[in-house]
Image (cartoon, rainbow, N blue to C red):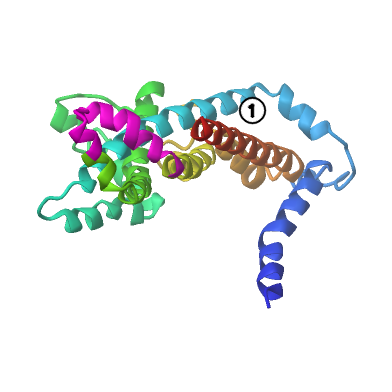
Amino acid sequence: MVAPAVILLLAVTAYPLVYNLWNSFHSENLSIATGQGGFVGADNYTKMFKSSEWLHALLRTLAFAGVSVALETVIALGLALMLHRRFRGRGLLRVAILIPWAVPTVVSATLWKTMFDPRAGFVDYVFGLHTTWLAGVWTSWAAILVADAWKNVPFIAIILLAGLQVIPTEIYEAARIDGASWSQSFRRLTLPLLKPALAVALIFRLLSALLVFDVIYIMTGGGPGLSTETLSFLNWQTFLVDTDFGYGGAISVMLVVMCLLIAGIVMRVMRTSAET
C-alpha cells in the first residue's frame, strides 16, 4: 500500500542525493570540453578544504545561522507569550502574523531590498539616515537579518504558541498560590515545559538558516564583493554559473553532512536537558 509513496520519495530525494555523491568523486565540469567524467577520488573535497573562499563562506553561514536563530527565537518567544494571553482581537492577530511567513521569500526579499534603497525606500527617511545599506559589509548583513527575521519569526512563534497551549493552566495557578512571581514561573515552569516545542522550532529554523540562499541572492547577490556569500550561494555559483558539478557536488555533500551533524547535536542537547 505504501510502495508508490516510497518509490516517489526515493525518486525525488534518494536518487538525486546518490547521484550528487557520485558526482563529488568525479570530474564533471561542463565548461571544460575534454577529460570529463573520470574518477578523481577525494580531489574535489581536498580542493574544497583548501579553498579560502569555502572556509570564509562556512564561517559566514555559521555566524548567520547562530545570530539569526538566536535573535528570531527570542522575538518569537515574546510574541508567542503575548498571543497566548486573552485579549480582544487575539484571533485576528494570530492570523495576521502568519502573513509574512506566507509571503514567498523572493517577494519579501525584494520588498525589503526596496525599503533599504536610499532613493526608493523609506528606512533612511524614517530614521533620518543617509546610508547605502546594501553597499557595506555590516549594513548588508543587518538588512539581511531584518528581512530574514520578518519572514521567519512568525513560523517560530506559531510553533512555540502551540507548545504553550498544551501546558496545563493549573500549574500556574498552583505556583501563584505558592507566591511565585511571573519571572519564577517563566524560568521554572514555562521554559522547561516548552522544551519539546522549542527543540522542533530550533531544528527547523536552524536547518533553514544554514541553507539560506534566496534572501541573499535577491538582496545582495553575495556582495559587496564576497562579504555575504554563504555556502548555499557558493554552491549555486559553482553548480549553475561555473557548471562544475564535481566540485559543486562536494560542497553540497558537506553542506548536508554539516546540517545533519548540527541537527543531531541540537537534538541530543535538548534531550539531555529535558531528562535532567
Name the amino acid type tagged 1: Trp
Q: In this orientation, does residue 247 appear?
A: yes
Which residue occupies the foreground of this view, 173 or 10? Answer: 173
For label 1, the residue is 54
Residue placed furthest toward the bottom = 1
- At x 77% / y 46%, what residue is drawn? 21
Coordinates of residue 137 in the picture (x, y in percent):
41, 23
Residue 182 falls within the magenta-colored stretch: yes
- At x 69% / y 75%, what residue is drawn? 4
Which residue occupies the foreground of this view, 139 or 101? Answer: 101
Compared across the picture, whether 36 is left or right of 152 comes to right
Coordinates of residue 28 in the picture (x, y in percent):
79, 45
Q: Is residue 135 above or below residue 10?
A: above
| Quarter-of-image position of residue 191 | top left
Q: Callout 1: 10 Å neighbours few (<14), some, many (20+)? A: some
Q: In this orientation, does residue 226 appear?
A: no
Q: Secondary structure at mark 1?
A: helix
| Quarter-of-image position of residue 151 | top left
| Span colored in magenta | 174-196
Coordinates of residue 122 in the picture (x, y in percent):
18, 37
Which residue occupies the foreground of this view, 211 or 69? Answer: 69
> In the picture, which quadrant includes the N terminus?
bottom right
Total numbered circles = 1
User: Taken as a whole, is the magenta stretch helix, strand or loop?
Assistant: helix
- At x 47% / y 28%, what residue is drawn? 66
- At x 74% / y 49%, what residue is drawn? 20
Residue 272 falls within the magenta-colored stretch: no
